[in-house]
Image: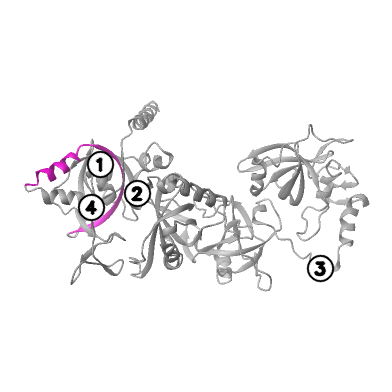
């Protein structure tokens, strides 16, 4: 027997616009027509042969469309939904949060006898009656339901067991189903991150604000913000890790510049919102959802507010180091891990506090097995070109059972472990998507930096420059003795070997790492730039150990000086940071090279032509 649309399915939805989550819905099968992608979600017209209603598939169902399960002109069984009024239009809107495909595309659109209507709200100013399958819509949105339309729902409730009827208390909306046009809703969520109470001052006065990140049992996240009275009311109420019922909040489109979770909307709770702890009910562990960014595509996120998720095979794990914070002089544990992925790039991830001592130690113990690690909510910085840093809300999963992890493991076992890998910070290229932002945005001349001594006073600022290394002083201190494990400076031990303050132990051997100053020049002027090991190796063309060996074997320093001279007058693209510092009670600029790349002339020519075009336009205007 072939599957057909449910007769009067749209009428059934109209009768029960917001069904209880525990109610046993009647079978609702509709045809999908006019299916199209709008933004990140798919929209369509739900058709039962007599009536149509505009509908939207929540983003969690997008994979059903891309996989071909849900097709245009196909049939779906709606399992959970919400029917909303659109305030700005005389129309209703069906949001499908759960459904399943029951039939592929039919040959044509389903139609039955009678006129086909698009479901709209009745206009108050018009004395109009619309009767469809016994449902009479009158002005002022009165609804009189004839027996034929209501019987299905009523009979269904009467046939339920008494315990089931009592369980119909509140409808829990999944976060993925929420939107700004909804009226009443209740969500059940866990607090997975809680910010500090902050104060602010603007033209409208002073106030306080804090926010929390909420996660439901499907792993969907949303950020909720509270101001002033609401902030003071709920700050102590919300506790990390606890589960709450929340209602009477409002939603708006999330500001992409400031959002910290993957959600199109953000929530605001006021003093009238309701927050109830779910203390006597079975709690849940939210599923961790990842949105992985390949390592070679991390460049555009450098020093931005948006956090990233990554997955990679562990290549190296450092011992725990003790880092002293400048703000409060507090010592915190830190551990660096290096991971690689199928892009054949590696990146360093810094773990802090408990992540460094717990998960970090677990990774160190199994480092020889090259485990796969997935990490959520990392900040992308520009240390050593590009690096990642964990936050208090970051989540680390070792050897996750996911398709991405299995694919990565298969790649590493078959070819990855024999492949030459490069650090992403050392290979940022202006012709790639990841390098474009790093090397071709914020392009300035040296004079722009040196003529503005106030640059970087509040926080470090970053620029890109194209310049030549014009001079390297040969008698400067160009390197330091470093621990081979943590790269920190070592000192000679009392008896033998060296003492590493970072690792808190004696080591028998050490390496040399560059720390030097070079003079760079462009058409506008010149400046001295500080350079660290990774960037210096690209400039000099050899490691500090190799240069030291050359210097020690060269009796008159001629070969040593020639090596430095060979590194000059070659053009480079530099990504630099600018910060102030004091020297002999005099304020100066410290310009530090953070990344370096060779000139790619095709890309550089394109950039210059675009710059010339802008000049022509400005002259015309």
Cα–Cα span, label 1 and label 3: 75 Å
Left or right of 82, for residue 371:
left
Q: Is residue 428 visible?
A: yes
Helix, strand or loop at disc 3?
Answer: helix
Cα–Cα span, label 4 and label 2: 15 Å
Outermost residue toward the bottom? Answer: 280
Cα–Cα span, label 1 and label 2: 23 Å
Helix, strand or loop at disc 1?
Answer: helix
Q: Which mark is residue 514?
A: 4
Give residue 481's position: percent from left, percent from top.
Answer: 21, 59
First in residue order: circle 1 vs circle 3: 3
- Along the line of sight, the residue nearer the viewer: 459 or 241: 241
Q: Which mark is residue 166?
A: 3
Residues marked 4 and 3 touching at CB (< 8 Å):
no
Nearer the viewer's eye, disc 2 or disc 3?
A: 2
Give residue 574's position: percent from left, percent from top.
Answer: 30, 43
Q: Mark 1 sits on what residue?
A: 447
Left or right of 599, for residue 290:
right
First in residue order: circle 4 vs circle 3: 3
Q: Where is the C terminus found, in terms of image quarters?
A: top left
Nearer the viewer's eye, disc 1 or disc 3?
A: 3
Nearer the viewer's eye, disc 4 or disc 3?
A: 4
Q: Mark 2 sits on what residue?
A: 385
Kindly identify the residue that appears in the image at 62 percent across and 67 percent down: 243
Kindly identify the residue that appears in the image at 24 percent across and 43 percent down: 539
Helix, strand or loop at disc 4?
Answer: strand
Residue 347 among magenta residues: no
Q: Where is the N terminus found, in terms of image quarters?
A: top right
First in residue order: circle 4 vs circle 2: 2
Badge 3 crowding class, 10 Å Cα cut-off, few under 14, some 14 to 19, many 20 or more, is: few
First in residue order: circle 2 vs circle 3: 3
């Amino acid at each position: 027997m072939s599957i057909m649309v449910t007769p009067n399915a749209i009428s059934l939805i109209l009768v029960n616009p917001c069904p209880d989550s525990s109610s046993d819905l009647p079978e609702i099968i509709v045809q999908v027509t006019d299916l199209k992608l709008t933004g990140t979600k798919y929209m369509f017209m739900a058709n039962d042969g007599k009536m149509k209603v505009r509908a939207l598939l929540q983003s969690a169902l997008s994979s059903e469309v891309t996989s071909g399960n849900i097709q245009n002109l196909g049939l779906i069984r709606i399992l959970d939904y919400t029917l909303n009024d659109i305030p700005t239009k005389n129309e209703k809107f069906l949001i499908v949060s759960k459904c399943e495909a029951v039939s592929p595309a039919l040959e044509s659109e389903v139609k039955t006898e009678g006129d086909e209507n698009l479901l709209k709200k009745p206009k108050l100013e018009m004395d109009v009656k619309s009767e469809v399958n016994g449902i009479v819509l009158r002005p002022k949105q009165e609804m009189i339901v004839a027996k034929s339309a209501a019987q299905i729902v009523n009979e269904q409730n009467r046939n339920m067991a008494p315990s089931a009827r009592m369980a119909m208390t509140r409808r829990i909306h999944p976060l993925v189903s929420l939107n700004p046009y909804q009226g009443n809703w209740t969500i059940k969520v866990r607090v997975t991150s809680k910010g500090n109470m902050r104060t602010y001052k603007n033209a409208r006065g002073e106030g306080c604000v804090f926010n929390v990140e909420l996660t439901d049992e499907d792993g969907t996240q949303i950020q909720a913000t509270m101001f002033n009275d609401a902030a003071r009311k709920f700050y102590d109420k919300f506790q990390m890790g606890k589960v709450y019922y929340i209602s009477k909040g409002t939603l708006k489109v999330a500001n992409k510049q400031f959002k910290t979770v993957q959600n199109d909307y953000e929530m605001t709770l006021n003093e009238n919102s309701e927050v109830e702890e779910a203390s006597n009910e079975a709690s849940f562990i939210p599923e961790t959802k990842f949105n992985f960014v390949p390592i070679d595509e991390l460049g555009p996120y450098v020093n931005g507010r948006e956090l990233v998720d990554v997955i990679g095979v562990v290549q190296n794990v450092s011992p725990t180091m003790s880092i002293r914070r400048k703000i409060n002089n507090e010592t915190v544990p830190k551990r660096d891990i290096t991971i690689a992925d199928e892009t054949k790039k590696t990146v360093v991830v810094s773990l802090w506090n408990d992540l460094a001592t717990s998960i970090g130690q677990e990774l160190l113990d199994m480092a020889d097995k090259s485990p796969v690690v997935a990490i959520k909510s990392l900040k992308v910085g520009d240390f050593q070109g590009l690096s990642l840093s964990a936050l208090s809300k970051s989540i680390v999963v070792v050897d996750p059972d996911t398709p991405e992890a299995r694919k990565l493991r298969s790649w590493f076992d078959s070819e990855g472990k024999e492949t030459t890998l490069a650090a992403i910070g050392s290979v940022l290229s202006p012709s790639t998507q990841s390098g474009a932002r790093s090397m071709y945005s914020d392009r300035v001349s040296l004079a722009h930096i040196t003529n503005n001594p106030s640059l970087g006073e509040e926080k470090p600022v970053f620029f890109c420059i194209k310049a030549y290394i014009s001079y390297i002083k040969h008698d400067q201190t160009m390197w330091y003795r470093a621990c081979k494990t943590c790269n920190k400076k070592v000192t000679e031990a009392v008896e033998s070997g060296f003492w590493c303050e970072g690792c808190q132990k004696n080591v028998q051997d050490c390496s040399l790492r560059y720390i030097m100053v070079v003079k760079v020049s462009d058409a506008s002027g010149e400046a001295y730039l500080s350079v660290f090991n990774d960037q210096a190796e690209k400039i000099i063309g050899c490691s500090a150990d190799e240069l030291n060996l050359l210097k020690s074997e060269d009796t008159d320093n001629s070969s040593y000086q020639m090596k430095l001279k060979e590194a000059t007058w070659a053009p480079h693209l530099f990504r630099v940071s600018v910060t102030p510092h004091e020297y002999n009670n005099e304020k100066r600029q410290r310009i530090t090279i953070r990344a370096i790349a060779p000139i790619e002339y095709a890309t550089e020519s394109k950039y210059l032509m675009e710059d010339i075009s802008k000049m022509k336009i400005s002259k015309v205007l």
